[in-house]
Amino acid sequence: MLEAKLLLTMVVVVLAIASFLKNRDFFSPVKFYLLYSVFFYFGIFVDDVLEITLAVYVFLIGCIAIALVLEPRATSFGVVGRNHRWWKYSAIWALSLPGIVTKVTFVVIAGGFIEYVNSLAYRVVDWQGKGYIVIWFYIIPALNLVYFCYLITDSGRSRLKMILYCFHFLLFVAIGVLTASRSYIAMTLVGMIVCYSYLSRRVRVLTLIAVAASVVLMVGFLGAVRNLYGGLDSDSLYEAAGNSELEVTHFRYGTIPLEIVFSQPDREPKLGVTYLSLLTNYIPRALYPEKLDTGGIVFTREYAGDQWGGLSNLATGTVTEAVVNFGKEFGVIVGLLLNLVFFLAGVFLYRNLLSRMRSDLTGRGLSPEWMVGYYYTIIAFARLSFSEFTDVFQTLIFFCVLPIALVTPVSKIFRSFGSK
């Protein structure tokens, strides 16, 4: 097993080097796939894992290698500046205000800041059925990123515009802290550096390192806060298969579900029902109380002993969720094929990005809205290998596609008012 891990480590390193030699773009899809596959599957290299878990990871790396072969090279960076008028910025503020008011209301209803923070451990239950409300403050990260993209491509950028953006950014960070979601802030910080690289100029290595260090520190700080106030989530200890206790950390998000599902006998296959939960989750719980269970809920309840009684659920990853739906033999194949399909979809989307960048040299093609949508989509495809199908795409649709789609029509409304 040790020899196999050493060989696998060499393969991953060679794949990373090959990716940089082929494409100097720091943020090409394959680099995200590699980063996520190493960070969230680091347990593969340091823990004693089942042979089948190791085999699944080997095939996952194989899927990334195929994506690397098909990934095009980036040859140009930067777009033509535009004069973003006041109505575009007004649309961002108009769409953000409901989320700001909602978060303040939650704090007031809880009885104050301390009481609200103490209640965050139960937010999964407390916010259940309130999706139509909480969505308003969950769309703010995408709005802030679009706002940032407007600013860096604005040929008429002024000090006032920059001050107003900084104020919006501070509100966004405050809401992120009050939401106790590490990805809420982290993904936007990463998105800012990615969007800047494509829309303005390539970032330097030192800048990239500084941003990465800031994200790690921020994630660690929020994790400490959540642990301090007793947050119940998958960062705690739980009993897995047999009697062994495993610590679930970010570095083991990918391996722990595989270890659990492969060390236990198959349950009754769900035959794809957990994927259909993506459709039923759109329906308000008040209208449809018995929604289909997502992969994480089914997995936590049936394979992890429902450790937290519904207060939190474990992520599955594509292979684990496919095993839950189709059993071990067929499920592993389905899960790996899903990874390959979405990895390749990201590569072809990247090809479209590069095409838009080339056309944008003539003033067309790559808009801030499209850039933000591209970024969140690539992140979604990279997350699939260790996250839950419904959560990944529901997050993408509700918290990214929806707010981005609303910005243009709302800005047109403000523009029409201004022209009267």
Image: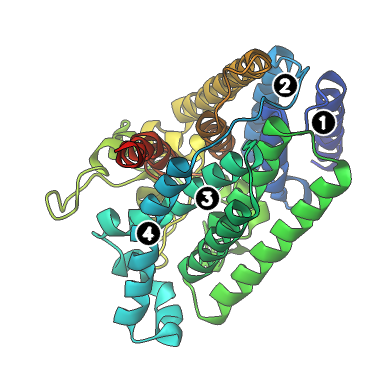
The mark closer to the camera, 3 or 2, is 3
- Check disc 3 and give the amino acid type: Asn
Secondary structure of the residue carrying tag 1 is helix
Question: The C terminus appears in which quarter of the rendering?
Answer: top left
Per the image, the residue denoted by label 3 is: 144
Q: Is residue 73 above or below residue 219?
A: above
Q: Residues within 10 Å of mark 4 (few under 14, many from 20)?
A: some
Q: Is residue 70 above or below residue 148?
A: above
The mark closer to the camera, 3 or 1, is 3
Q: Residues within 10 Å of mark 1 (few under 14, many from 20)?
A: some
Secondary structure of the residue carrying tag 3 is helix
Q: Residues within 10 Å of mark 3 (few under 14, many from 20)?
A: many
Q: Residue furthest left?
A: 287
Per the image, the residue denoted by label 2 is: 65
Q: Is residue 116 above or below residue 166?
A: below
Marks 4 and 1 close (CB-CB < 8 Å): no
Per the image, the residue denoted by label 4 is: 97
N-terminal of the two: label 2 or label 1?
A: 1
N-terminal of the two: label 3 or label 1?
A: 1
